[in-house]
Amino acid sequence: MSRVFRWLSHWPLWALHGLGAVLGWVVFLASAAYRRNLLAHAALAGVSRSDALASVAHAGRMVAELPRLWLGPPVPTRMEGAEHIRAAQAQGHGILFLTPHLGCFEITARAYAEQFGMEPGRAMTVLFRPPRQAWLREVVQTARQRPGLDTAPTTLAGVKQLVKALRSGAAVGLLPDQVPPMGQGVWAPFFGRVAYTMTLSGRLAQTQRTTVLLAWGERLPWGRGFVVHVLPLPQALPADDPVAASTTVNQAMEQLVLAHPAQYLWGYNRYKTPRDVTHKELAA
């Protein structure tokens, strides 16, 4: 598999996206559970069926583009909203980037690292959970270890590393719509249904001299590359209420997703119940 992955990394982006679109539809048609989740989640958000079905191909493209992004030559990428990053840096602030499962979330950290992370003390740190497969673990570790981009383990030590990065004026990247392990989140609404939501984004946002920005990577048609959009958080996160803070984050993610619903990963099981949750906790 490692050889196949490296072979695919030399493919042009348009060919990978074409392959990914086909694979996305194969999975959609072959898996009733995946198909049911994708359509139900999109309907819950009020997304049209045409946008929901368009997301099927984008989910496949997201997977197929990884070999090129991790191991291949650079792809065309531009950033819109870089002035928000410069403004935060001018104030000496660390930057917390919140990115949903929208478009190519892999490219957001890469674009920041290439444009800003090379400056001393400006690297981006992202949480990293090694894949279970040995061959993929080696590939991912090689891809993630590059100038301007650091990784932190999904442990208490990793969280401390993120806080240290923010305090030093560096950047941190999170996917706040990822379901956290039990004990690391709260139940908060997401598109009208409660979802177990990480509290880490709200806690990190309270780090002294930290600016919170939203970022997502738009996938351009016909393999023309990506546009990384950077925007300010619409409203500040409440400091003393984890549920209110998580709700505010979810609302910000909803706004991003609804602006480009065809590129959201609707098949992701956002509403799954973490392991070891009790009936009492679920009812609450």
Image (cartoon, rainbow, N blue to C red):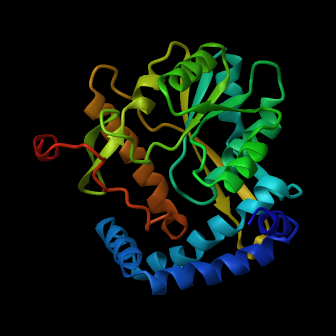
Q: Is residue 186 above or below residue 203?
A: below
- Which residue shows up at 85% across the image and 68% down it? 7
Does residue 235 appear to the left or right of 14 in the view shown?
left
Image quadrant containing the N terminus: bottom right
Q: Is residue 236 visible?
A: no
Q: Is residue 187 left or right of residue 279?
A: right
106 on left or right of 246: right
**Image location (x, y in percent) of residue 221:** 71, 73
Q: Residue at 24% across / 56% down in the picture?
A: 193
Q: What's the residue at 47%, 87% (across, down)?
A: 29
Instruction: Report whether residue 169 is seen.
Output: yes
Q: Is 161 rendered above or below residue 34? A: above
| Residue 5 left/right relative to 253 | right
Residue 95: image location, x then y, percent: 61, 27
The image quadrant of residue 151 is top right
How many numbered marks have been drawn onto this rendered protein structure? 0
Res. 112 image quadrant: top right
Q: Position of residue 139 (x, y in %)?
A: 75, 51
> In which quadrant of the rendered image does the C terminus lie?
top left
